[in-house]
Image: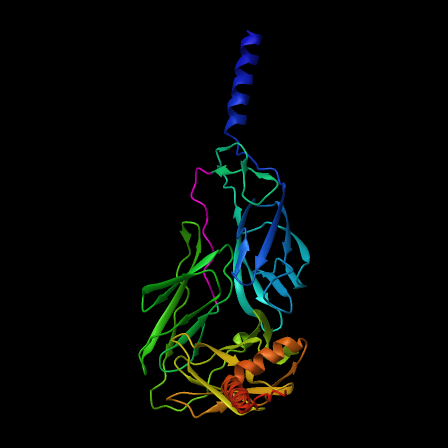
Amino acid sequence: MKSKFFIILLLLLAISAFQLPTKIKADRVTANISFDSEQGSFTPDHINANQGDTVIINFSIPTNDTYCCGIQISGANGEFDTGTISKGTSQQVTFTANSAFIFTAYWQGIRTVKATGSVDVITPTHSAAYVTPPVQQPGLNQTVPSVVPTETSIGPSVPEGLYVQIIGPTQIDVSWLTAKGATSYEVYRDDKLISTVSTLFFNDSNLTADTTYTYKVKAKYSDLTSDFSMPITGKTLENSKTGTMFIDLTQNYVSIDKIVYPYGQVPDINRGSDFNIFGRTEANANVTITVNSNSDVYNIVANNDGNWNIKIDASKFDIGDHAFQVSVASQNTARFSQQNPFHFKVILENPNSYLVSQIRNNWTLIALIIIVAIAFLIFLKKRKPETVKTS
């Protein structure tokens, strides 16, 4: 009788133990992530971890990265900030995985956003049924258990702090604060979904002048979305309205032989270098670059997002000091010039390249000199006296 009682008791304990929630043991997850300015991407661009895991990421920047002055990477919720990572170096960050978030790479100094990645955190529910065998994650050297929940997971929090900036008659920029647990955001204009982004901003262009628009944002994680944020409205400028010209300082940079520098950090360059100036201002604005040293003027119209790029003919530069100045205007604003010109120096490192550039720039004159020389030689040959034979 006692033996039967103990057997029944053991069976009940076994059944109760099987029904208890399975707790996932905290683990250590490591990943090596490289960043490429030219492609604007992380490789890999996301990692997976369980809630409570210790995550170690080693961010590396290649020696041939296109940006001159270092990369800065930070977690959207303040999980980490690498500070400046120079070309050819790496930086390791360590944090505890509490909730999913995005991380962003900036060009240090001008805060140009170049890439975003994500950390996806698996949050176990109170009635998780079982743990599947470990699954190897791409780019990781550690296996991460995956959870099969029997209840619906809780989605990301609602975005807050919506802010609009009126750029002109056809553009409004919308930004917001990080929502906990979000890896992307859905942007709605007048209750219609217009874009899904992984950043904390959206530039809405091709709008109608003198029109009011209402924006709302939802946070998104996998198939889960939050409720709508509080709405915010913005009204585009009238076509005839005079306003302040918008200049995006995070997009002011130059490219010298495919290496990028901020306006104020242009290095000494060689005559004939591949020289491009980039910027962003009001959509469809008229942009003028003036090279002060030789009075060359370059004009271009910004695109619908306000971005523009002007190629400078550096073969015209003399050796010495130079400067360029940017001015912009549109139908709604008077011409606005950036206050101080940006200085740089042209040096001569290769005499052969200088000679080639001189020939290229003066080929008409050189061809004329050659033709005259040939004609003169022919003339001399015809005038050559005959030899007198003596007996």
Towards the viewer: 275 or 37: 275
Q: Position of residue 109 (x, y in %)?
A: 62, 73
What are the residue bounds of the magenta stretch?
149-160
- Give the dominant element type of the magenta stretch: helix, strand or loop: loop
Towards the viewer: 20 or 39 = 39
Q: Is residue 150 magenta?
A: yes
Up-down: is 304 above or below 286? above
Image-based side of 347 in relation to 281, left or right: right
For residue 258, say whether it is visible: yes
Give coordinates of residue 237: x percent, y percent: 36, 84
The x, y position of residue 218, in whole percent, is 41, 60
Q: Residue furthest top?
A: 1
Q: Residue at point 51% right, 23% down?
A: 15
What residue do we see at 56% from left, 63% from top?
37
Residue 3 on the magenta segment: no
Image quarter in which the N terminus is found: top right
Q: In the rendered image, which quarter contains the C terminus?
A: bottom right
Whether residue 266 appears in this view of the structure is no
Q: Is residue 214 above or below residue 14?
A: below
Q: Is residue 229 above or below residue 3?
A: below
